[in-house]
Each structure stands twice: as C-alpha cells, then as structure tokens.
Image (cartoon, grey):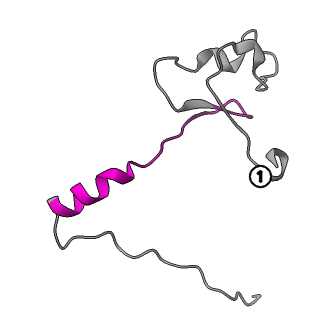
Amino acid sequence: MRDGLGLRLELRLHDAHDSNVRVAGALRRAAEGVPADQPGRGRTMAAEHFLFARPALESISVLNARYPGQSAPPIRLLPTDLAPT
C-alpha cells in the first residue's frame, strides 16, 4: 500500500543511516537534519522538510464554548462534472 499512495514521508528515525531519503552529491543524509526534540518532523523523498500534526479533537468543545455562535466558513466543493473546454 505504501507505494500506491504516491507520496512517501519519513519521520525522524533513531539512526539516520536507516533513512530511505537520498540527496545526490550530498555528504550527509537528509535525515540527519531532522530535529530530535521536535515531534512530527521529517523529510519527504525529495528531502524537503515537513511537519505532521494531529488535530486536538478534545479541544473542540472548549473552543465552541469560548466562541459561541462562531464557526468556520463552509468548505467549497468542487464541481461534480467538468465539461471540456
């Protein structure tokens, strides 16, 4: 399934030598640049830095109580049928 997603992400590894991220011509592995003290950080297969976060769902009721009557704007949906131009 990993290959079917089209995107591969690599979180911080204990040993940077286990990384699958390679940068042509680089003397160090890209995984060595991922900070150890900042959870959720990693590298894409193109060696780009990313930050992955989990939403704090338990905070929803607290936020709703703090801001009564306010909500996020509705999500715009894409058209279901596209005609060729």
Residue drawn at point x = 82 percent, y = 21 percent: 24
Q: Tell me which residue sits at (82%, 49%) in the image.
A: 1
Q: Is residue 12 above or below residue 71?
A: above
Q: Which residues are magenta?
A: 43-65
Residue 65 coordinates in the image, percent (x, y): 17, 62
Q: Position of residue 4 (x, y in %)?
A: 83, 52
Left or right: residue 2 compared with residue 69: right
Residue on which the image places disc 1: 5
Residue 19 shown in magenta: no
In the rendered image, residue 23, in percent from the top left (x then y), is placed at 77, 23
Q: Amino acid at mark 1?
A: Leu
**Above or below, comparing residue 80 to residue 11 in the picture:** below
- Would you place residue 47 above or below residue 32 in this image? below
Dot 1: what SS? loop
74 sits to left or right of 9: left
How many marks do you count on the picture?
1
Q: Residues within 10 Å of mark 1 (few under 14, many from 20)?
A: few
| Camera-nearest residue between 53 and 29 | 53
Q: Residue at x 16, y 69 (%)?
A: 68
Residue 55 forms part of the magenta stretch: yes
**Front residue of this view, candidates 63 and 43:** 63
User: Looking at the rendering, in which quadrant would you find the C terminus?
Assistant: bottom right
Nearer the observer, 38 or 60: 60
- Residue 17 in percent (x, y) is at 76, 13
